[in-house]
Amino acid sequence: MSLRARLTLLSPALLLLSAADEPLLVPDVSQREVEIQYSFTGADLLLFGAIVYPGGKQPKKPADILVVLKGPDQSIIMREKQKVAGIWVNADTARFRSAPSFYAIASSRPIDEVVDERTAAIYEMGVDKLQLSPSSLNDSAELDRFQAGLIDLRERAGLYVERPGTVEITQGVLYRARLPLSARVIVGDYTAETFLVQDGRVVAAAVRDITIRKSGFERFMAVAAEQWPFLYGLTAIALAVGMGWTAGAVARRF
């Protein structure tokens, strides 16, 4: 369904919401469910919607929009390698209890021009504002180094993304933004959150849920591993032994 058609369907809701005392957001996403198959190479999600102002009156100063796409939190252990006597070995270790598996943000202007440091930290607006909950480090310098390393690794993998200045706002009420979904995302429940910011203050927020799941043969294997782990393990061992025996037989013939 096109963006115009979706907004047309939302128009009755906009009329009802226009009587509210505070601005409201009516958001949506192009896909509520994303299916991952063996050929999945990533996707572009369109986040769009409308801003409903009290009485339909827009403020003199244009408002800003930030959209955040966030995946399930993960507990991560990072290990730093050092070269000792010519051999690379694990040295320092850091554990983060709640690092987002995926994080992408887009804004109508650069984030530091939209909100101050405190507001950005409260709402985790930006990869450098993520609350990763470290549990094994006390030294602040060491913590900063590991956090920077984690963010750098995930940015290079396309799992942490920032796109400032890419949210389009039309006539002050309609907005849209595209965020990339990496091929390396994990399955689970994701959230697409939209923030309306006026004079550096968040005046409205709304969330839409997105489900990412496997489909086809990949889904069958994931369900089998979860529901019948013993049989799944035996089958995997049998397949590995069979393929090894077959490869050996072929090699002996040649």
Image (spheres, helix red, strand yellow):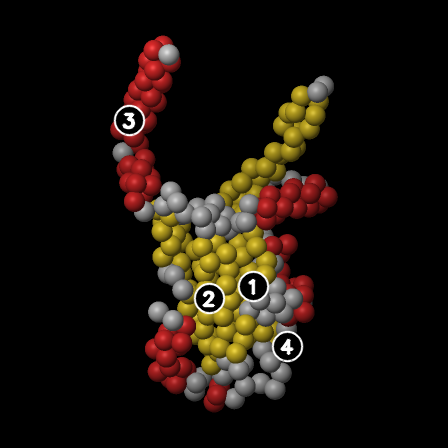
Q: Nearer the viewer, mark 4 or mark 3?
A: 3
Label ID, residue 235: 3
Q: Secondary structure at mark 4?
A: loop
> Whole-percent x and y of residue 94?
61, 38
Q: Residue at x 46, y 64 (%)?
A: 46
Q: Kindly indicate whether the residue at mark 1 contacts the one at mark 2 (C-beta within 8 angstroms).
A: yes
Pointer 1 or 4: first along the chain: 1
Which residue is labeled 1 in the image? 106
Camera sees residue 119: no
- Residue 49 vs residue 148, the one in the foreground: 49
Pointer 4 or 2: first along the chain: 2
Label ID, residue 199: 4
Q: Residue at x 45, y 51 (%)?
A: 42
- Residue 187 vs residue 45, the one in the foreground: 45
Pointer 4 or 3: first along the chain: 4
Residue 64 position (above or below residue 141): below
Q: Quadrant of the C terminus?
A: top left
> Whole-percent x and y of residue 41?
44, 48
Pointer 1 or 3: first along the chain: 1
Q: Nearer the viewer, mark 1 or mark 4?
A: 1
Q: Residues within 10 Å of mark 2 (few under 14, many from 20)?
A: many
Q: Nearer the viewer, mark 4 or mark 2?
A: 2
Q: Label 1 vs label 3: CA separation?
A: 45 Å
